[in-house]
Amino acid sequence: MTEVPTAISGEFPFEKKKVQILGSQMAYVDVGASDQKSAVTVFLHGVPTSSYLWRNIIPYAAEKGRCIAPDLIGFGNSDKVPGAYFFEDHQRYIDAFLDTVLPTQAINLVIHDWGSALGFNWARRNEHRLAGIAFMEFIHPIANWSDLPPVMVENWKKFRDPDTQVGRSLLIDQNVFIEHNLPGGVVRPLTDEEMNAYREPFLQPEWREPIYRLPNELPVEGQPENTWSYAKKYMEWLLASDKPKLLFWAKPGGLVWEAKAEELAQRLKNTKVVYLGEAIHYVQEDDPHTIGRELANWLPLSSD
């Protein structure tokens, strides 16, 4: 008998806490029982989302233990701060957040988009604290623009145009990442409730600097040099590491296409691979319940 799919809810059923990090407030979800001995599961989102992205997945993992899901600085309910929101800025905030909220506990990372770059780069430097790492539609060094879907290439080259203000106009004035890229990265239509939850942190153009900056940091064809270098290093670490891994992928995907997923399935050690079916980039919005169930069944309990 075929199981009837569970509905995808737009409700965000969590209260957020706030913590002072590097002089600013970061918001985060903190649910599930904690016993200090078991690994804590940390969810890291990317652009232009927030912890809202994980709303249908966290309840599965919370049955196994404590779950933390921060809003990156400038995103969700975290503070907007002066600055350019470069990758290295976000890394400083995430490093400090984890040092403050989870100073000693083992951690399971569940990561997506720019949250994957931040999570992989943290894990590379803190492997002794890592229990396991689950990832989907993640940031990796992209050797050629032609590896990406043509529509994505056309849009992102406009976002990254160094000689004009086209990128800033599209991302800040016209808010295209929220209004077009986000729903375009989901197979099903997002509801008004869901779209409004994603819009809310960026209602004013001056709040959209984080959405502009990180697309310009995507490591493609060796540029920008700093994020390309970080991504090369953490992918080398990932391929060498024996830590438990859980890779989700979908067709057609966005950042992770079928050939890339198959390559990783062959090369990664100690890795379970889960195919999600039809989805694009924001796989959590198309198949959160498969992700949640598979995650809960896989979660390592410690960093041993």
Image: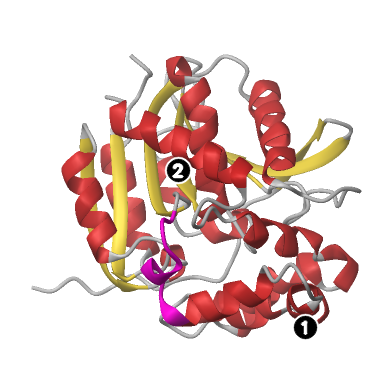
On screen, residue 205 versus residue 175, left or right, reads: right
Q: Quadrant of the N terminus?
A: bottom left
Q: Which mark is residue 259?
A: none
Q: Which residue is found at the position 41% from the left and 68% from the top?
A: 254
Point 30% across, 59% down: residue? 249
Query: Is 264 located above or below residue 108 in the figure?
Result: below
User: In the rendered view, does 237 fall on the left or right side of 239?
Assistant: right
| Residue 44 visible (yes or no) | no
Q: Residue at x 79, y 76 (%)?
A: 164
Q: Where is residue 240 shown, x and y percent of the image?
A: 30, 27
Q: Nearer the viewer, mark 1 or mark 2?
A: 1
Left/right of residue 159 with respect to residue 243 in the rendered view: right
Closer to the chain start, of discs 1 and 2, is: 2
Residue that mark 2 sits on: 110
Magenta highlight on residue 144: yes
Give the residue pinned by disc 1: 174
Residue at x 45% of width, y 67% of height: 145
159 versus 265 height, above or below: below
Indicate the quadrant containing the C terminus: top left, top right, bottom left or bottom right: top left
Please provide the residue range marked out in magenta.
Answer: 142-150
Dot 2 crowding, Cα within 10 Å, few <14, some 14–19, many 20+? many
Label 1, secondary structure: give it: loop
